[in-house]
Image (spheres, helix red, strand yellow):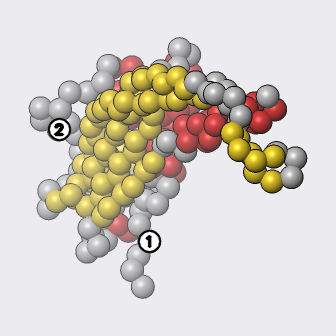
Amino acid sequence: MKMMRFGFAVLAATYLVSVAMAQSVSYNYDQKANFAQYKTYKWVTIEGVAAPDQLIDNDIKQAIDTQLASKGLTKVEDGAQLFIAYQVSITQEKQITTFNSGGYWGYGPGWGYGWGAPSMSTATSSTINIGNLVLDMYDAQAKDLVWRGEASKTLSNPKNPEKRRQNINKAMAKLLKNYPPSPKK
């Protein structure tokens, strides 16, 4: 019985670690771009891309504004050096979880040799929602994409709006951690 509880504890801990690490970010940039020249930006919309509801849209933009301000960029309405836009999507994945409800086997001193009682396995299937956010930065004069960041995270849909804002703020801080890219040496 102790072995079964230990096995379940290991399985549960592994699952919790995988969920905690589910957030991933990546970025790419134009290696010829001089990011030191960019001091101002303006939000633009991408034609044909649906935004999330107005409250979440405001939370996302505010989180990005906060990160960009900490990097020395200023939001302006006219004369921006960068155009900033984002898009979001939700994809779904199937997750299958199995649980073995009995049985044991062993080898060596204290265990004996061979198999023990029969076991029964149960499997359940669930759908996981994965949120994706892509943030694009365009050189306003050349109209060229100079930086793109992507963040993905398993969504948990917190009931508390403040918790949702905290999650968005953490994701945008992680996404923009390496902006601006380090200059080439």
Q: Mark 1 or mark 2, which has the lower sequence index?
A: 2
Which residue is at 21% across, 58% downward? 145
Which residue is at 63% across, 27% downward? 118
Name the spot of residue 120 as percent of width and height, x first: 58, 24
Name the spot of residue 70 as percent of width and height, x first: 51, 51
Image position of 82 (left or right of 72)? left
State the residue position of label 2: 46
Which residue is at 43% across, 50% downward? 25
- Front position in the image: 155 or 145: 155
Q: Residue furthest left?
A: 48
Q: Amino acid under label 2? A: Ile
Mark 1 residue element: loop
Name the spot of residue 89 as percent of width and height, x first: 28, 33
In this orientation, does residue 49 appear? yes
Q: Quadrant of residue 11?
A: top right
* Mark 1 crowdedness (10 Å alpha carbons): few <14, some 14-19, many ≥20: few
- Front position in the image: 127 or 144: 127
Q: Quadrant of residue 93?
A: top left
Q: Amino acid under label 1? A: Ser
> Which labelled disc corresponds to residue 40?
none
Q: Residue furthest right?
A: 110
Q: Evaluate if marks 1 and 2 touch, with contact meaning CB atoms under 8 Å apart.
A: no
Mark 2 residue element: loop
Which residue is at 12% across, 35% downward? 47
| Location of the C terminus (image quadrant) | bottom left
State the residue position of label 1: 182
